[in-house]
Amino acid sequence: MIFYIDFYIDSETHEIHQSVCNYLSAKNKIYLGIYRNLGMALNHAKSKGFTRASVCNSCNVSF
Ligand SMILES: [Zn+2]
């Protein structure tokens, strides 16, 4: 599955979404990578420096 992280300049938190998520911002997103699940994407995002990253609840439900 392909994951993106949303990125807002004025926000301190970043949410990780699947590429198909309805809540994924069209503009404010950064390609994260391809992972087997949301947890792996989250770990990778944190290792990249997105220490305040969290997972999107909407994406979570779909698993
Ligand atoms: Zn989402």
Image: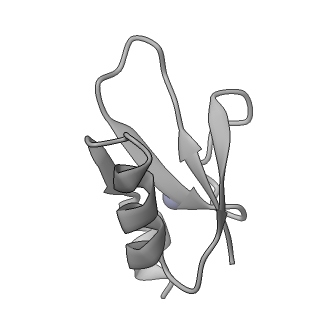
Question: Where is residue 49 drawn, in percent x and y?
Answer: 37, 40
Q: Nearer the viewer, residue 63 or 1?
A: 1
Q: Residue at x 47, y 54 (%)?
A: 16
| 42 in relation to 27, above or below | below
Residue lying furthest top in this view?
10
| 56 in relation to 63, above or below | above
| 23 in relation to 33, above or below | above
Q: Is residue 29 visible?
A: yes
Q: Residue at x 46, y 14 (%)?
A: 9
Q: Residue at x 65, y 39 (%)?
A: 30
Question: Where is residue 39 drawn, in percent x and y?
Answer: 38, 76
Q: Residue at x 60, y 77 (%)?
A: 35
Q: Is residue 23 visible?
A: no
Question: Where is residue 37 drawn, in percent x and y?
Answer: 50, 82
Q: Is residue 50 left or right of residue 6?
A: left
Q: Quadrant of residue 43?
A: bottom left
Question: Where is residue 4 drawn, in percent x and y?
Answer: 62, 52
